[in-house]
Image (cartoon, rainbow, N blue to C red):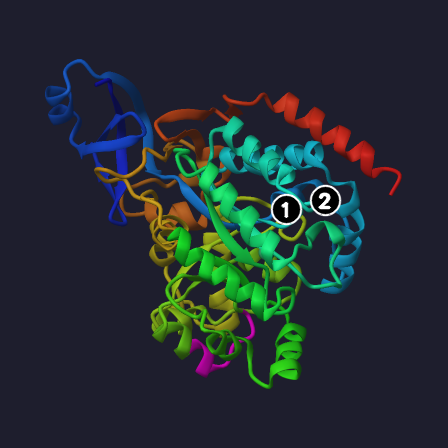
Amino acid sequence: MMTTLYKSDFALTDGEFIKDRALAVQNDRIVTVGPYSELSARYPDAHVVDWTGYAVIPGTINAHNHSFQSLLRGIATDEPFLVWRDQALYKYTPALDPDTLYAGALLAFGEMLQYGVTTVTDFFYVHGNGTENDEAIMKAADDLGIRFIMARTMYDWEGAPIAYRETVTDAVSRTRSLARRFSAHPRITIHPAPHSPHAASSEMIQAGHRLAKELDTPFHIHVAEEMFEVNDILRGYGVRPIHYLDQLGVLDESMIAIHLVWLEQSEIDLLGARKASLAYCPSSNMFLADGVTKIPELMRAGVRIALGTDGGCSNNRTSVFEEMRMTSLLQKVHRLDATAIRASDTLAMGTEVSAEILRLQTGKLAPSYAADFVAIDLSDLSLQPCSRDLLPSHVVYSMQPTAIKRVVVAGKEVMKDGVLLTVPQARIRKLVASAQDRFAHI
Ligand SMILES: [Zn+2]
């Protein structure tokens, strides 16, 4: 079997930059990690990729995104949440069809690859009463070569645009049929995603949870992003959102809750006891003035935390390294405590913890893990002064995208020196411009 050896100055394993650590890759997996001299003796016929001057780190994992929102970047910025929602999302939704959604996904995922994201979860809800739109998003991920999870949204709140809404029966059968069709795909997985306690009925949420059990996947749900959502649930059901979800019987280890900004301690304790997870999107929470999630308390309660960029019009960047930095800075300043969280915590959240939560064997440079990794240029000024001991904190606090030189997903190089190798950037720009033309009359 063909082996490729990636030879670099350092590899990030178990939170440390280890000197002279090469990776042996066969097909789409890492098979061995060790000193280059050992690996070259063991695999004498291997193809050698010489990354001298670089360090290899795991690709980052974006646990929460809405790719179409990249098309709406810059629209309704500096507005309150509900004004932003109506003016950016709801207003432009009728113009979204498979072509525009494909353009948006190429833009979102292509940009992410440039920043070292090797896996993305798209919480996708513009179904247009079918699966054609979903397939356009999957095609974009496939064309770019990024690892992809579609959190296929199940949405039945009548206040939302018609393109988002489905009956419980349709939502379940379409999500199930996509999951079956893509079950053999090496890089694409489908998870159910009842939108939120305020935009999915109790029946829809329970159906999403049941379907996740049937498909043996987690399920995703937005919870308590804004205070009004908590008040809605309190008014409707007399309990706070986490207690409501617990009463529905869906609060367990399969739940990936997004945001979790407005929680009381009893909810934090319950999330920990039930082993639920969080996909945390600090930049988006700041951008929309949602509030500050209690990350140290959730960590202490045993809730596992992944990081997400959220949509491209509520951030407006798409880098998980950026979210590592924002997680640290926001939590520190909010508590006036520089020890509230460490770089090593947020680095793990953006890589291996996210992968565990999403049930993917990636996010780590170790045998049998997916060959999803990033080479960073040790001569980049954002990594100076440079040393083994300083690098883990540099990756979180100082590294800029200029340092990200190579991106490999499933053993295939997809970005080199800032240029995507799978879909030409000029093509992405052209498709985005024609989507923009269609928005012009709105
Ligand atoms: Zn979201």
Residue identified by numbered label 1? 312
- Three-letter code for the amino acid on which mark 2 is drawn: Leu
Nearest to the observer: residue 260 or residue 204? 204
Q: Find ligand 1 in the image and state its quadrant.
A: bottom right
Q: How many marks?
A: 2
Q: Residue drawn 39% across and 55% down?
A: 349
Residue 178: x and y in percent read 51, 41
**Residue 263 against residue 175 in the figure, above or below:** below
- For the record, the magenta segment spans 261-268
Nearest to the observer: residue 133 or residue 91? 133
Q: Secondary structure at mark 1?
A: loop
Q: Quick one: label 1, few (<14), some, or many (20+) residues within 10 Å?
A: many
Residue 318: x and y in percent read 56, 44
- Three-letter code for the amino acid on which mark 1 is drawn: Gly
Q: Quick one: label 2, few (<14), some, or many (20+) residues within 10 Å?
A: many
Q: Residue drawn 40% across and 58% down?
A: 213
Q: Quadrant of the N terminus?
A: top left
Sequence-first tag of 2 and 1: 2
Residue identified by numbered label 2? 72
**Residue 280 against residue 320 in the figure, above or below:** below
Residue 435: x and y in percent read 75, 33
Q: Residue drawn 25% across and 25% down?
A: 26
Res 202 seen here: yes
Q: Secondary structure at mark 2?
A: helix
Labelled pair 2, 1 in contact (Cβ < 8 Å):
yes
Q: Residue drawn 85% across and 37% down?
A: 440
Magenta stretch: includes residue 262: yes
For marks 2 and 1, give the CA distance.
Answer: 7 Å
283 to the left or right of 45? right
